[in-house]
Image (cartoon, grey):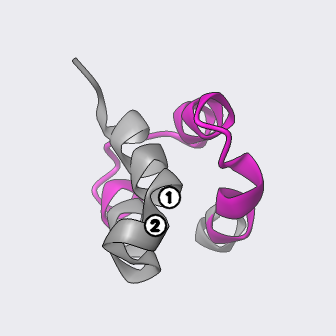
Amino acid sequence: MTNIARTVADCFKFRNKIGLDVAMEALREAWRAKRVSMDELWRYASLCRVANVMRPYMESLS
């Protein structure tokens, strides 16, 4: 079982397989629909070890 923030972090983790554009779109859509918070995104980005990759994209949203 997973949640939306974990799914977005996984998209960035597997960005080489699915494409960076897909990962960025997942992040934008989740944030636009207010389905995730920055705290949730940051938590799962850290757990999936993609925090440094996601940081510039997360900063551009806020």
Image coordinates of residue 6 in percent, x first then y, are: 41, 35
The residue lying furthest to the bottom in this view is 21
Say which mark, if any, is on residue 59. Answer: none
Q: Secondary structure at mark 2?
A: helix
For disc 2, the marked residue is 15
Q: Residues within 10 Å of mark 2 (few under 14, many from 20)?
A: some
- Does the magenta run of residues contain 42? yes
Q: Is residue 41 left or right of residue 10?
A: right
Instruction: State whether residue 12 is above or below residue 5.
Output: below
Q: From the image, which quarter does the N terminus lie in? A: top left
Q: Residue furthest front?
A: 17
The local secondary structure at tag 1 comes to helix
Name which quarter of the figure residue 52 lies in.
bottom right
In the figure, is residue 55 to the left or right of 48?
Answer: right
Q: Nearer the viewer, residue 2 or 59?
A: 2
How many residues crowd mark 1 within 10 Å: few (<14), some (14–19), many (20+)? many
Three-letter residue code for mark 2: Arg
Q: Residue 25 location, x and y as percent?
A: 35, 73
Q: Which residues are magenta?
A: 29-57
Quadrant location of the C terminus?
Answer: bottom right
Q: Quadrant of residue 18?
A: bottom left
Q: Position of residue 13 (x, y in %)?
A: 51, 52
- In the rendered structure, which amino acid carries the disc numbered 1? Phe
Q: CA distance from mark 2 to mark 1?
A: 5 Å
The answer to whether residue 56 is magenta is yes
Q: On the image, numbered disc 1 is attached to which residue?
A: 12
